[in-house]
Amino acid sequence: MTDPAEHRARLEARNAAMRENVAGLLADLNRRTSELADAQTRAAAVTGAATSPDGLVRAVVNPAGVLTELTLAPTAFTRSTPEKLARLVVATAQAAAGSAREQVEGLLAPLQGGTDLSSLVEGAPSFADLLRPPTPPPAPPTPGRGPRHAADPDDDDGFGSVFGGQR
């Protein structure tokens, strides 16, 4: 049988150790919350920029990869076809979005380590969930040309259906 005073002293020592542990965890949580807020502020200011290899297109995007600026060289329409220029705009905007994503990931990467709140408190949010950079929406499909219809031999002016095919 143990002495009640001795038992009480052990409980108080255990309680003091747990309080010290919780105080350390709270201090770590406060520090990480502050670092997260700072990183989110810096991430919100990120822009990604890219220029096409031929210099005809320059694209700038926000942290989510949304196009905010598009510049075409004055010679873009004389040095390229509309189809090639359209593909170049898409590729350059995607490169700018990749640049922005890398910058945001670089800002948030240092915050990935340490004790996670979700491992300490059931149902609490995970820092990893809060640190995921926004994913840009998927690129829209490249529009293709629809099937070409053979011209009606009687339709030389393009208004055959409006004028009943005859003039």
Image (cartoon, rainbow, N blue to C red):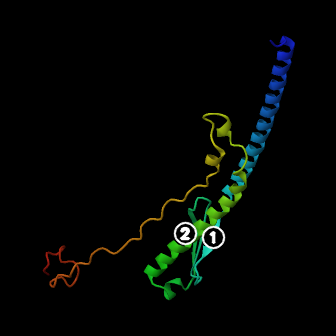
Q: Which residue is mark 1?
A: 49
The residue located at (55%, 57%) in the rendering is 135
Closest to the camera, between mark 1 and mark 2, is 2
Q: Earlier in the sequence, mark 1 or mark 2?
A: 1
Circle 1 packing at 10 Å, graded few (<14), some (14-19), many (20+), is many
Position of 156 relative to 103 (above/below): below
Position of 98 relative to 163 (above/below): above
Residue 106 in the image, given as x and y percentages of width and height = 69, 60
Between 37 and 8, which is closer to the camera in this rendering?
Answer: 8
The extreme front residue here reads 1
The residue located at (61%, 52%) in the rendering is 132
**Left or right: 78 as drawn, with respect to 36:** left
**Left or right: 39 as drawn, with respect to 130:** right
Give the image quarter of residue 20. Answer: top right
Q: Which residue is mark 2?
A: 94
Residue 62 in the image, given as x and y percentages of width and height = 61, 61
**Left or right: 140 as drawn, with respect to 58:** left
Amino acid carrying label 2: it is Gln
**Left or right: 136 as drawn, with respect to 38:** left
Position of 30 relative to 109 (above/below): above
The residue located at (51%, 77%) in the rendering is 88
Q: Which quadrant of the rendered structure holds the N terminus?
A: top right
Q: CA distance from mark 1 to mark 2?
A: 10 Å
The residue located at (49%, 84%) in the rendering is 77
Amino acid carrying label 1: it is Ala
Position of 44 relative to 25 (above/below): below
